[in-house]
Image (cartoon, rainbow, N blue to C red):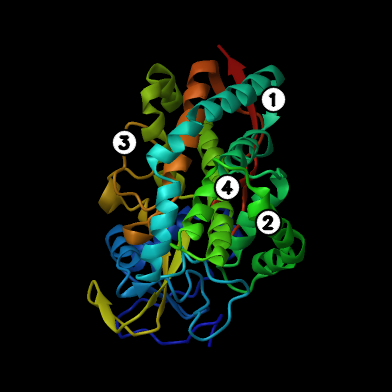
Amino acid sequence: MIEGHLAFRPTEGVPIWDIDPFDEEILADPNEYYAELRAKGSLVYIPKYSVLASGRYDETKEIFSDHTRFVSSRGVGLNDFRYGTPWRPPSIILEVDPPEHTRTRKVMAKALSPKAIAKFKDAFHAKAVELVDALLEKRRFEAVSDLAEAFPTAVFPDALGMVDHDPRPLVDYGAMVFNSMGPDNALRRKATAMIPEIVPWIMAACARSRLRPGGMGSVIYEAADAGEITQEEAGLLIRSFLSAGVDTTVTGIGNALWCLAANPAEYERLKADPSLARPCFEEVLRYTSPVHTFGRTAAVATEVSGVTIAESSKILCVLGAANLDPEKWGDPDRFRIERRPVGHLAFGAGIHGCVGQNIARLELETLLTVLAAKVDRIEFAGAAVWRPNNAIHALDRMPLEFIGK
């Protein structure tokens, strides 16, 4: 066993690469690692963790979207749930396969459908205007805490119907869950140490008695009342909203601000045509891959691009590398908001595509539209610093300056 899964040796001809993809320097600046991973082959064996890693677009999409051969139910991190007990209950939306996944996904999809979330649009817009106006007055600010974290932690709990608002545990909970998907390194140990402090707050805040009627949370509990899921499963799904619906959106906003500050000509295009807000966000997702790596487990002996894969093999789907594959995108290292990168893997693929992507898109489209209307220039006011995380590519801090029109 290595990192909670069965160790294995690669078949003949598979490149072997002695690297630690969870090294904090690589996590903070991964593009060189991505490029070398793609260059080495369609699948690469990493002996430190006894895993195969996929960084090319076609193979990564095939593995990531084929839920029959490559399952999520055995864990989307390094641990194989067949051979060990995870530190937390597996996600009943992210770490299950059909038919269980079909049942819970249906409930979540109803709560997060475009029709269901349309009612939040005005509130999202009002909060975006409030925050951007305040930052224009301030002019220089810390973009991660003052905007990337502030906006989702203000609007998402209200949309969910939460009575309790505390931005810190909301943000830290997502970072904790995503760090747990990596190896037993310092990042994961730090995340595990936060459990006694954060998890009780999250569980209490997600209790039915702490949710207002009319929010997304009430839809989940109404499904439990109707017998579609159990009351216990309803609580787990509510917590899934927070683990996957806050930190990833925080990351997406921070990454979008970084992209626009670093590419002023593209921001000029957005100002000239605010209808490009949605394509801009899609390009941010492709270019920066907020979720950089997710795991799959081979449920059967199989083959991908001529490489034989043994049953129980753990595979790292390196989404960040696939989203920068020149064979797919042509000029992947350029940030172009008019690209419209259909097929990017930042929100996953297949039946496990991110169930919360509609509300994430609504949040980002709203915020980018407000920025385009009110902010003439977005400029760096200091160095941007990336925060290492075993599964998320996020900024730790980024001083910015907003210059009004």
Amino acid at circle 1 = Arg
- x, y percent for residue 107: 43, 56
- x, y percent for residue 300: 31, 83
Amino acid at circle 3 = Arg
Q: Which of the two residues, 373 or 202, is positioned nearer the viewer here?
A: 202
Between the residue at mark 3 and the residue at mark 4, the CA separation in whole angstroms equals: 26 Å
Between the residue at mark 2 and the residue at mark 1, the CA separation in whole angstroms equals: 32 Å
| Residue on which disc 4 sits | 246
Q: Which of the two residues, 175 or 55, is positioned nearer the viewer here?
A: 175
Looking at marks 4 and 2 on the same chain, the residue that comes earlier in the sequence is marked by 2
| Residue on which disc 3 sits | 339
Looking at marks 3 and 4 on the same chain, the residue that comes earlier in the sequence is marked by 4
**Disc 4 or disc 2, which is closer to the eye?**
2
Between the residue at mark 4 and the residue at mark 2, the CA separation in whole angstroms equals: 13 Å
| Residue on which disc 2 sits | 202
Looking at marks 4 and 1 on the same chain, the residue that comes earlier in the sequence is marked by 1
Indicate left or right for 48 with 276 as reference. Answer: right
Between the residue at mark 1 and the residue at mark 3, the CA separation in whole angstroms equals: 30 Å
Considering every residue shown, the one lying at the far right of the view is: 197
**Mark 3 Cα-neighbour bin, 10 Å: few <14, some 14–19, many ≥20:** few
**Mark 4 Cα-neighbour bin, 10 Å: few <14, some 14–19, many ≥20:** many
Question: Is the residue 187 above or below the residue 291 in the image?
Answer: below
The number of numbered badges drawn on the structure is 4
Q: What secondary structure is marked by label 3?
A: loop
Q: Which residue is at 36% across, 76% downward?
A: 15
Question: Is the residue 322 above or below the residue 283 in the image?
Answer: below
Looking at marks 2 and 1 on the same chain, the residue that comes earlier in the sequence is marked by 1
